[in-house]
Amino acid sequence: MSNIDYITKYLNDYLNMDNPQYAVLIQGKWGCGKTFYITQLIEKWKNKNNETVPQNCIKLRPIYISLYGASSISQVSYLIRKELRPFLYSKGMKVAKKIFCGIIKTATQGNFDFNGDGNTRDFSAIFDTESIIEILSKPNDYVKGDKILIFDDLERCKIPIDEIFGYINNLVEHSKCKIIIIGDEDKIKKQSENNTLPSKYVEFKEKLIGQTFSIRQDLDTIIETFINDSHNHHLQDNKELISDLFIASQTENLRIIKQCFSDFNRLISSLDATKYNKSLYEIFIQNVIAYFIITYCEYKNGNNYIKYFQNHTSYFTDETVKENVSNIENKYISILEKYNIKYSYNSITIKDIISFIDNGYISNLTATLNKSDMLNIPHSQDWEQLWYYGKLDNNTFLEKLKSVKNLFYKGEIKYVSIVLHITGMFIHFNRIKLAHCNESFLKQKALNHIDKIFKKQNDNGCFLIGSYNASWGKQYMEYTSEIMVELIKYAKNKLNNYFEKERVKFCKSFWENIDDDKAGNISSVFKESIPSGYCSYELSSIFQGINTKRVASRLSRLSNTSKENIEMYLSIRYYLPETKITGAISQYHLDDLEYLKGIKDSLIKLTSKQKLIDKLTTKSLVCTLDKCINQLISSPKTV
């Protein structure tokens, strides 16, 4: 029996008791589904207990009260009266007269005229008194049904715990009410500890609460309920995928899950499915569902590293980012592979989904959809058609195989990813005995292609190899084979080297050609992303590979204001004490050390040729460089 089933059975038994003389507490963190559970249970109780009562009687049903924001006992009484009012009106004024006869007169000095004229203005005055609560506290032949009250949001109640528990205890002991309390007990305990009451929460609880339950929802059931309530066939068609993703995300807050479905419906409602091929659209939506849920759960749970997930490449220079993105990948990769989910940029990107969460819309969504390879059937290259070899007839297969062989063995390929795809296909065909090839020769040819691409091309898009052993929306065949593992690793190393060279080239060009304009923008320049896209230049060595003499010469000729800008930037970068900015010296700081020494030595020589203010400001720059050097030498590497 599940946790929920056990609680439900207990509560049903509790309600069948004649006079239990204690309340039941259902506790759990905010968003865990306490309210969702109890409201569903209330509906079942209402529907189950449908026996008729005499026409001259009213029948009570479970009364749900939220204590959120309640600041006085009289306010709670008002909320109860408000819920009781529909029961009284349900049978008309004559029945109400019988119920209140002998109660109202005393409480209101006999000011009511129950003459059967149907005038409810007289009757409404009842609700300005406490007398309506007498329905719960005194026996009445005209009131049928159980006196069941559910008090929710106890931790959000502003009434001191001793007062609200005393009020509820009076209903339990003297009115024979059956009370269910809903709340976050951890928060209630903290609130109790912070007040100055002589008795604490635990003591009050012992006098009132006879049984406590902690909610542990059946996530599969909850998700299925939310999906059914959404009336969205896309969600209903992908129940297993959705359930797997939510479970992997470890999201227990049902409000996040419910809001996720609501926001997804809002996003999908803005799309016109009639514009696209039906089968392609279904695949597209499945991919959107997958990445929408992943992004929503991570982002709403405070994991801002989700914005780096599948962010163009997988090549990080920042180890913290790399570790956190790897954790995200490990959560979901098996699910993405199980359902054949393509890379996110083929549908709606993580960046766009975050924009939708933050702003409620995606700018240029139409343009994004028009560019999607998943929605728009592109002109397929021969190798792409060969990838779907199982759908080809014999003649077409042989024709495409011949074309791709000519391309691979005699032609020139522009993209590393295509080299890997073709190599994987040929290995696969060879191993399933569909087409023979010499795998050793194939491997060498693939290496030659990769080398040639990195040598000839200047567009880094030609070098990318995708993620999850896939690119172009397709997985590399035989990606676990020894040859493919070696080729993918080789291509990754080449790409890392390329990105590193481009980073060094950028910094070298900046410093060796520095002028007053560049010096004025130095801070913003080094905040830009490095070629790999996963950190800024300022989180890497910014002097690596420079010609120190050339840089010193350029620095010495800067305006005095520009020299001050350079001094300030270096002081902040290396955490000089006078800036009052603290930070850890990292390896990328230490990588600058020898270059800083070289610049300083060259500047010292150049000052002998300068005069007056120019000489003074250059000496000041030398002094700052010397402080930075000493800071790096004396500070232990901590990161």
Image: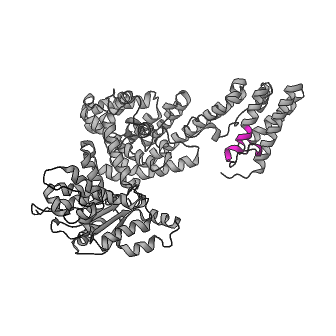
Q: Is residue 199 visible?
A: yes
Above or below, comparing residue 87 to residue 627 in the picture = below
Above or below, comparing residue 100 to residue 396 in the picture = below
Percent across and percent down for residue 483 are 45, 45
Percent across and percent down for residue 508 are 68, 31
Q: Nearer the viewer, residue 429 or 326?
A: 326
Percent across and percent down for residue 77 are 33, 60
| Residue lying at 32% horizontally and 47% vertically, measured from the top left | 339
User: Total label count?
Assistant: 0
Q: Which residues are magenta?
A: 570-592
Residue 106 counted in the magenta span:
no
Residue 583 counted in the magenta span:
yes
Q: Nearer the viewer, residue 52 or 634?
A: 52
Q: Is residue 609 visible?
A: no
Image side of residue 382 versus residue 625, left or right: left
Above or below, comparing residue 324 to residue 14 in the picture = above
| Residue lying at 81% horizontally and 41% vertically, measured from the top left | 626
Image side of residue 179 versus residue 304, left or right: left
The image quadrant where one finds the N terminus is bottom left
Image side of residue 595 versus residue 499, left or right: right
Q: Nearer the viewer, residue 58 or 375?
A: 58
Image side of residue 360 versus residue 101, left or right: right
Q: Nearer the viewer, residue 208 or 552?
A: 208
Q: Quadrant of residue 593?
A: top right
Q: Quadrant of residue 265?
A: top left
